[in-house]
Image (spheres, helix red, strand yellow):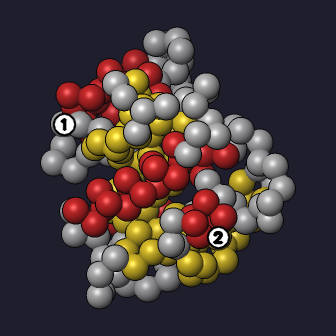
Amino acid sequence: MAELSIHPATHARFDDLSLVIGPKRADASVCWCLSHRIDAKTNLALRGPERGAHMEALTRERVAPGVLAYDGDEVVGWAAVAPRAGLPFERSTRIPHVDDQPVWSIWCIRVRPGHRGEGVSHALLAGAVDYAASKGAPAVEGYPVDNAGERVDLTMAYVGTRRLFERAGFTLAATTDAVSGGFPRVVMRKQLATG
């Protein structure tokens, strides 16, 4: 395996992004990592190709919607990262605010099949933190499951695990009322700068 590299998911990398988070069928109304990025009404309204078009527009903005991992020239994963203030998490009744810092959130880590178990999720999490820091984030949060080492269903594993975040230097900041895949979710926080 070549050394993994992490890059912002800019418009120039949209084709690679679509390989990781786009559905297999162009008319499918799933994924594109939008359900936790936009409000529920808009998420339900975007159908088929509109979902990809919405994500493509996000890649044209000043702040990329996340980061991509590469093994050489092959894209192998994605992590969504953005300021919490612009996400549904900002208004969540299940994921509490820890304090008033303008934190960034990491809520989706996706590794392409065939590349799991190769450290891609660790590289993605570190890259997402670095990207947020480069944009001035004072702290970064994640909302992984606290699975106590139990197996997490792959369809729900995108939120990450408490252990993954702990290995990246995050600490437990709060418990939540949220559950994913049958496991409680927690708020993990990594302080980047004095808030």
Residue at numbered disc 1: 60
Residue 194, image x and y in percent? 29, 87
Q: Which mark is residue 164?
A: none
The answer to whether residue 5 of the structure is visible from this angle is: yes
Q: Position of residue 188 (x, y in %)?
A: 55, 72
Q: Nearer the viewer, residue 85 or 23?
A: 23
Quadrant holding the C terminus: bottom left
Secondary structure type for disc 1? loop
Say above or below: 1 vs 194.
Answer: above
Label 1 CA crowd tier, 10 Å (few <14, some 14–19, many 20+): some
Residue 93 seen by the camera? no
Looking at the rendered structure, the number of numbered marks drawn on it comes to 2
Between 64 and 46, the residue placed more toward the observer is 64
Which residue, as the protein is rendered here, is positioned at the far left? 62
Residue plotted at (47% across, 36% down): 77
Name the amino acid type tagged 1: Arg
Q: Are marks 1 and 2 in contact (CB under 8 Å)?
A: no
SS of the residue under disc 2: strand
Q: In this rendered view, identify the residue nearer to me: 25 or 92.
A: 25
User: Which residue corresponds to the image point at 45% horizontal and 75% vertical from the top-left?
Assistant: 190
Find residue 154 and report its image quarter. Answer: top right
Q: How far is disc 1 from disc 2 in space, using C-alphas?
A: 32 Å
Crowd rating for badge 2 (residues with CA inside 10 Å; few <14, some 14–19, many 20+): many
Identity, as a three-letter code, of the amino acid under mark 2 = Val
N-term mark: 1 or 2 = 1
Mark 2 lies on residue: 186
142 left or right of 66 in image: right
Looking at the image, residue 27 sits to the left or right of residue 13; the answer is right
Horizontal and vertical percent position of residue 100? 37, 84
Q: Quadrant of residue 166?
A: bottom right
Q: Is residue 23 above or below residue 6?
A: above
